[in-house]
Amino acid sequence: MKKILVTGGAGYIGSHTVVELQEAGYAPIIIDNFSNSEESALEGIAAILGKEIPCYRVDCTDAVAMRQVFEQEQDIQGVIHFAAYKAVGESVAEPLKYYHNNVGSLVALLQVMSEFNVYNLVFSSSCTVYGIPDKLPVTEQTPVQKANSPYGNTKKICEEILSDLAASGAEMNSIALRYFNPIGAHPSARIGELPLGVPSNLVPFITQTAIGIREQVTVFGSDYDTPDGTCIRDYVHVVDLAKAHVVAIDRLLEGKVDKLEFYNVGTGNGNTVLEAIQAFELATGVKLNYKIGPRRAGDVPKIYADVTKATEVLGFKTTSTLEEAMASAWKWQVSLKESTTEA
Ligand code: UD1
């Protein structure tokens, strides 16, 4: 079985990808510093797969420690690099933390990969690189814009690092996946999103409100130029998103990538915040306490993906509906409550 190193493999998207990799016949190996993830994710992965996945507690900015992992594991065939900070607001308050971690880890990783002749990388990018797009849906040709947060800028800079490396002729093949809005959880409810503190993302805020941890969801703005006035996003089920990484690794290992490719990973559908809330209510039968509030600074009014390239080149298409994703997020939230009640 081909070994694939997954940095941030105990995190939200990482843990789901580890499961999909193993189920597709790869041997995933996790690196995580557990700064924004829990050991319980490893137990969840083991419960789903019926086996434990090797995990190194290593910080990806630490090239010395990373080298030891590559030495110990030998013949790693590819790397999927998730490890990064992702809180937009925090990145505004602590930009250096974000540049150090998100940019520093990619640079260290690329150096260590080259030393060990590992030349296949999947990088976690984001639709945030498109800023406020002029035309919708966004394709991979849509111009990248100035980032509106240090977090977004780290994604843009990391893409530029990969482009510069490709232009240098260095031996490295990469796929950058530009995620739209990942939501939901594994159908087993053994792994899912574990936000630290008060969630800033919509779906964990919805599920925590519905279960009684939070009082009320505030819908950020109802005066946007959209059918119901609330922002539009492309919500993609995290299991679908995880599968996109498997096909990206397949393509790299088949030698089909010439230096660097970019793909949007979304459903191709845009939904408003109110539609997302309605989908949650329909999927779960739970009535959500929400109110309309002011706009949140920095929000993009509307964005959703053109998925033609991923469909045609990667042969990748999402299969889950918004309701299914919401139902899985809810099942996960309920299971978290049950496990804390039992403990
Ligand atoms: C943001 C980033 C994205 C990043 C993600 C990671 C931008 C433009 N997008 O996504 O790149 O990967 O965070 O965390 O920087 N909403 C409410 N009430 C809430 C929470 C959210 O109405 O309590 C609305 C937001 O206004 C938005 C939608 O729900 O329209 C989704 O918000 P969120 O889940 O925070 O994701 P993004 O801001 O799209």
Image (spheres, rainbow, N blue to C red):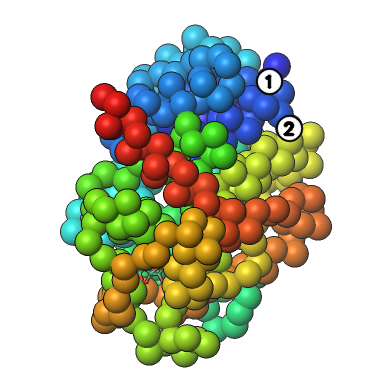
For residue 92, say whether it is visible.
Answer: no
Where is mark 2, residue-wise?
253
Number of residues whose C-alpha sits closer than 10 Å to that of mark 2, classed few (under 14), some (14–19) or many (20 or more): some
Which residue is rendered at x = 32% and y = 71% of the image? 290
Answer yes or no: do the residues labelled 2 and 1 have beta carbons within 8 Å? yes
Query: Viewer-proximal residue, 4 or 217?
Result: 217
Coordinates of residue 95 in the picture (x, y in percent): 24, 55
Q: Amino acid at mark 1?
A: Lys
The vertical placement of 86 against 22, above or below, is below
Image location (x, y in percent) of residue 293? 27, 79
The residue that appears at 20% across and 54% down in the rendered structure is 94
In the image, taking residue 185 as reference, residue 146 lies left or right, namely: left
Does residue 308 appear to the left or right of 92 in the view shown? right
Q: Dot 2: what SS?
A: helix
Q: Is residue 178 above or below residue 97?
A: below
Residue 127 percent location from the top left of the image? 51, 63
Between 279 and 131, the one nearer to me in the picture: 279
Residue 312: x percent and y percent?
A: 81, 57
Residue at the location (47% across, 44% down)? 331
Q: Is residue 227 left or right of residue 312?
A: left
Question: What's under tag 2, amino acid-wise?
Answer: Leu
